[in-house]
Image: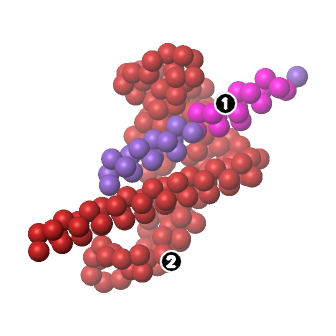
C-alpha cells in the first residue's frame, strides 16, 4: 500500500541528482507532506494492493502450487510455468502502476486518471518499454544466477575444506 | 540475497525517472 509513496520518494531523489543536488533520505518523506497528494497516493496504494491480491489469487487458481511447498533446490525444480503465469498476469498491473505514482504524487492527478495515463504512455512507447523490460529481466536474472553460483561454490569449497 | 534484490529493484525503479521525463516532460516541450 505504501509502494506509490516509495516510488515518488525515489523519483524525488533521482530528480535531486539530475538537478545537481545531493539526495537525502528526506526525499522519501516528501510524498507524505502535501495532504492532497498523500490522500491520492494512499488511494493509489490501496488500488495497487487490491490488484496485487487479485493477481496472486488468479495465479494460484490457474497454476496451483505443488503440495509440500518446499523451496526449489535446483534450477530444474523452479516452477517456470507458475512464474510465467504470474508475470503475464502482473504485466497489466505494471502498466497501470508504472507512471501513476509520479502523475498522482507530483501533479495531483486522481488515481483512476493517472492509471489511465500510465497505460496510454506505456502503450504508445511499447517498443522502448519492451527493450527496457528485456534488459531489466536479463540484468536481474544474470546477477541472481551469478550470485547463487558464487554462494553455492563458496559453500561447497568450505564444506570440502572441513572434510 | 535480499540486499542484492533491493539494489536491483532500486536500479530498475530509478530508471523510471528518465522515462517519466522523456514521456511527460520532454515530449510536452516539443509540442508547439
* Chain assignment, label 2: A
Residue B5 rendering spot, x and y as whole percentages: 39, 51
Left or right: A81 in relation to B30: left
Residue located at (32% from left, 51% from top): B2
Left or right: A7 in relation to A163: right
Q: Residues within 10 Å of mark 1 (few under 14, many from 20)?
A: few
Q: Is residue A10 magenta?
A: no
Residue A98 falls in which quadrant of the image? top right
Name the one closer to the observer, A142 or A16: A142
> In the image, which residues are magenta?
B16-31
Left or right: A71 in relation to B15: left
Residue located at (33% from left, 47% from top): B3
Q: Which residue appears farthest toward the right when viewing the image?
A: B32
Residue A9 falls in which quadrant of the image? top left
Q: CA distance from mark 2 to mark 1?
A: 36 Å
* Chain A shade: red
* Chain B shade: purple
The residue identified by callout 1 is: B21
Which mark identifies residue A70?
Answer: none
Residue located at (37% from left, 58% from top): A147
Amino acid at each position: 500500500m505504501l509502494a506509490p509513496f516509495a516510488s515518488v520518494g525515489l523519483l524525488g531523489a533521482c530528480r535531486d541528482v539530475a538537478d545537481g543536488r545531493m539526495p537525502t533520505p528526506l526525499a522519501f518523506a516528501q510524498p507524505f507532506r502535501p495532504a492532497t497528494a498523500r490522500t491520492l497516493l494512499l488511494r493509489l496504494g490501496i488500488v495497487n494492493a487490491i490488484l496485487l491480491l487479485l493477481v496472486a489469487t488468479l495465479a494460484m487458481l490457474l497454476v496451483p502450487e505443488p503440495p509440500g511447498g518446499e523451496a526449489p533446490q535446483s534450477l530444474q525444480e523452479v516452477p517456470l510455468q507458475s512464474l510465467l503465469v504470474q508475470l503475464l498476469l502482473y504485466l497489466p498491473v505494471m502498466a497501470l502502476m508504472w507512471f501513476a505514482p509520479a502523475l498522482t504524487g507530483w501533479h495531483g492527478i486522481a488515481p483512476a486518471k493517472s492509471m489511465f495515463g500510465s497505460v496510454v504512455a506505456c502503450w504508445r512507447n511499447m517498443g522502448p518499454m519492451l527493450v527496457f523490460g528485456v534488459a531489466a529481466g536479463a540484468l536481474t536474472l544474470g546477477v541472481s544466477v551469478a550470485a547463487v553460483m558464487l554462494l553455492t561454490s563458496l559453500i561447497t569449497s568450505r564444506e570440502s575444506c572441513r572434510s | 540475497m535480499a540486499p542484492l534484490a533491493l539494489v536491483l529493484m532500486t536500479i530498475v525503479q530509478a530508471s523510471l525517472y528518465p522515462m517519466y521525463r522523456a514521456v511527460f516532460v520532454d515530449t510536452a516541450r516539443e509540442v508547439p
